[in-house]
Amino acid sequence: MSGVGPVEPGQGTRAWDSTPPPPRHRPRLEPPARVFARHRRATLASLTAAAVLAGAGYLYATRPERPAPAPPPYPSQVTALTYLNPQVRTPGTGKRNFRFDALLSVESGPEVTMIRISQPYAGLSVTSSPRTPFRTKAGSPRKITITLRVTECGKVPQGAGLPFLDVTLRNTRAIQTHSFILGPRYAQDLSGALQVACSNDSR
């Protein structure tokens, strides 16, 4: 081998770079105060929203419970049956019938259904017009006609002191049977009707 000149690198070799690579730049950390100042609005908005949500959650969790709505009244507490007057007897009605008008009224609450009407004397039967069952709304009194028919004179009282009617009522709260005393005028009219109905019958 002869001659002068640079030595050629052999196969599979490479030259070293004489200049070192530039140092990596590490980002400079800013002080927290400067970061907060730059993002002040966003940070305050986030903190405010978090505080509002926390307050709302606390108020919701500690809110007073609403009391349960009061149940409707029992039908007998709000229903009244008032005696009005006896109906004039017309030919063909028979002397064994005593027919009178009454007023059924409901003071408040849901509508009341009159399911059944009866009376305590075995010798009398009772019907009504309109026929049961029928409904009556609060604030809308309903006039009804009640007919008592003597079926057996031996089982009716000679003098009805405090006669009453048993009425079965229903509303959304309960079903009740209530005894309505219709007053002294009803007692007098009923006693007179019974005496007329059974005047010719032996007891």
Image (cartoon, helix red, strand yellow):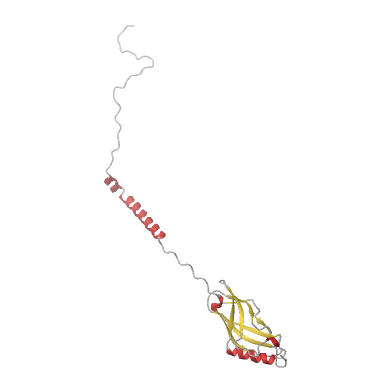
Q: Where does the image place residue 66, in percent across and percent down from the top left?
A: 45, 66
Would residue 155 appear left or right of 7 to someone viewing this image?
Answer: right
* Outermost residue toward the front in this view: 203
Q: Where does the image place residue 43, in percent across and percent down from the top left?
A: 33, 50
Would residue 56 appear left or right of 131 to someone viewing this image?
Answer: left
Towards the viewer: 66 or 183: 183
In the image, is residue 140 above or below residue 17? Answer: below
In the image, is residue 56 above or below residue 144? Answer: above
Towards the viewer: 94 or 4: 94
Q: Is residue 88 visible?
A: no
Q: Quadrant of the C terminus?
A: bottom right
Q: Where does the image place residue 93, in percent across and percent down from the top left?
A: 71, 88
Dividing the picture into quadrants, the one containing residue 145 is: bottom right
In the image, is residue 36 above or below residue 11? Answer: below
Q: Residue at x 34, y 52 (%)?
A: 47
Towards the viewer: 47 or 74: 74
Q: Residue at x 35, y 52 (%)?
A: 46
Dividing the picture into quadrants, the one containing residue 119 is: bottom right
Q: Residue at x 40, y 57 (%)?
A: 57
Q: Is residue 179 visible?
A: yes
In the image, is residue 65 above or below residue 101? Answer: above
* Outermost residue toward the top in this view: 2
Q: Where does the image place residue 158, in percent across and percent down from the top left?
A: 66, 90
